[in-house]
Amino acid sequence: MTKKIIKILSILVIIGIVLLILIQFIPYGKNHTNPPIISSPNWDSPQTQQLAKRACFDCHSNETVWPWYSKIAPVSWLLYHDVAKGRSRLNFSDWSSGWPIESGELAVVINEGEMPPAQYLLMHPSARLNAAEKDQLITGLLNTLNR
C-alpha cells in the first residue's frame, strides 16, 4: 500500500513540474515594460508624493518595479493583471486625463485596507500604511486633486 502511494505521489509531482515548465511558454504576463511618464500630478507636498510612491506606484504608475518573480508563471499572470488593472483605474504617470475616481471612493479603499491589497503587502511590507499615514495620504491626494 505504501509503495503504491509513493508511486502515485511521485507521478503527481512529475506532472506538476512538467506543467510548471510548460506554462512558462504562455506569453501572457511577460511584457514588463513601463510606458513613458506622460504627466504627473501637481503634488500638494513631497510627503504625499512619497507616501503614494511607497504604497501605490507599483500598480498605479508607469514606474512599476518588476521583481524577479514577476517573470515566473503563474505569478507573472497575477502581477501583470494587477498592474494593468491598476494603471487603467488610476495612473499617477498619466495625469493629463485628470482624476479618474471619486474622492469618496479613494478614502474608502485606503481606509478599509483594500489598497494596497493584501497580496501586495505580503511581498512589500514597506507599503503598509499605519492609520496616520493613511489619513495623511488621503488628505494629501484630495489636496492634490483640488490644485
Image (tube, rainbow, N blue to C red):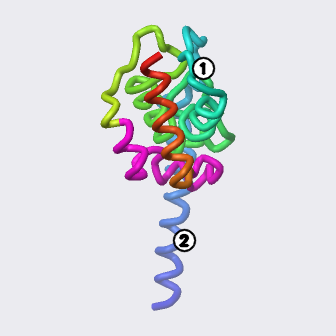
**Which residue occupies 49% across, 45% down?**
135
Residue 104 visible in the shown view: yes
- Name the residue at the bottom extreme: 1
Three-letter amino acid code at disc 1? Asn
| Residue 15 picture location, percent across and down | 49, 58
Label 1 sits on a secondary structure element that is loop
**Which residue occupies 53% across, 80% down?**
6
Viewer-nearest residue: 116 or 35: 116
| Residue 112 picture location, percent across and down | 38, 52
| Residue 72 picture location, percent across and down | 59, 42
| Residue 123 picture location, percent across and down | 61, 52
Q: Residues within 10 Å of mark 2 (few under 14, many from 20)?
A: few
Label 2 sits on a secondary structure element that is helix
Q: Look at the numbered discs 1 and 2 and tell me whether their residues touch, using CB distance below 8 Å.
A: no
Upstream in sequence: badge 1 or badge 2: 2
How many callouts does the rendering have? 2
Can you tell which of label 1 and label 2 is closer to the viewer? 1
**Which residue occupies 52% across, 38% down?**
137
Residue bearing the label numbered 1: 34
* Residue 126 is inside the magenta segment: yes
Magenta highlight range: 106-128
Q: Say which mark, if any, is on residue 47.
A: none
* Residue 131 is inside the magenta segment: no
Q: Quadrant of the N terminus?
A: bottom left
Residue bearing the label numbered 2: 10
